[in-house]
Amino acid sequence: MVFSLFAVSSCRSDDDPVDNDFFAGTYNGSISYNDGSSTISKDNGSVFVTKIASGTKYNFRFSDGIPDLNGVEFKKEGDNILVMVGGTATSYIRIDNNELKILYFADGKTWTANCTR
């Protein structure tokens, strides 16, 4: 019962992924994936984001058959924004309370997301 209350309260849309020890939230919007031989693109997709035990790493579970991104490390930027460690202007993941922006390249594959909560 206590865990259920914690889990429900941690998923509220006003929770901030930057300041919570535990975070789980769904961001909705346009998502896409390209692996060089096929492309998945959805205007009404979703990404379920969870903060894992390390406290600096996050998992991103995409809808619509898009492979997940797991164990991505983040650092705090400003008051309420997380940016991917090692990100650049052309490859990044940026997350805050209301928005998730992804343009991520790895092993010839590309993930994108432009989502809100």
Image: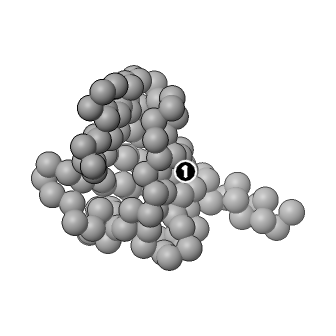
Q: Who's the residue at 46% across and 57% down the image?
A: 70
Q: Who's the residue at 14% across and 48% down the image?
A: 90
* Camera sees residue 27: no
Location of residue 99 with respect to 42 vertically, above or below: below
Name the spot of residue 44 as percent of width and height, x first.
45, 24
Name the spot of residue 12 as percent of width and height, x first.
60, 52
Q: Quadrant of residue 30?
A: top left
Q: Is residue 97 left or right of residue 11?
A: left
Name the spot of residue 68 as percent of width and height, x first.
47, 46
Front-most of residues 12 and 87: 87
Location of residue 4 with respect to 33 vertically, above or below: below
Location of residue 48 with respect to 18 vertically, above or below: above
* Camera sees residue 62: yes
Q: Is residue 85 left or right of residue 67?
A: left
Residue for badge 1: 25
Say few, some or many: other residues with alpha carbon within 10 Å of mark 1 (under 14 / 14 to 19 / 20 or more). Answer: some
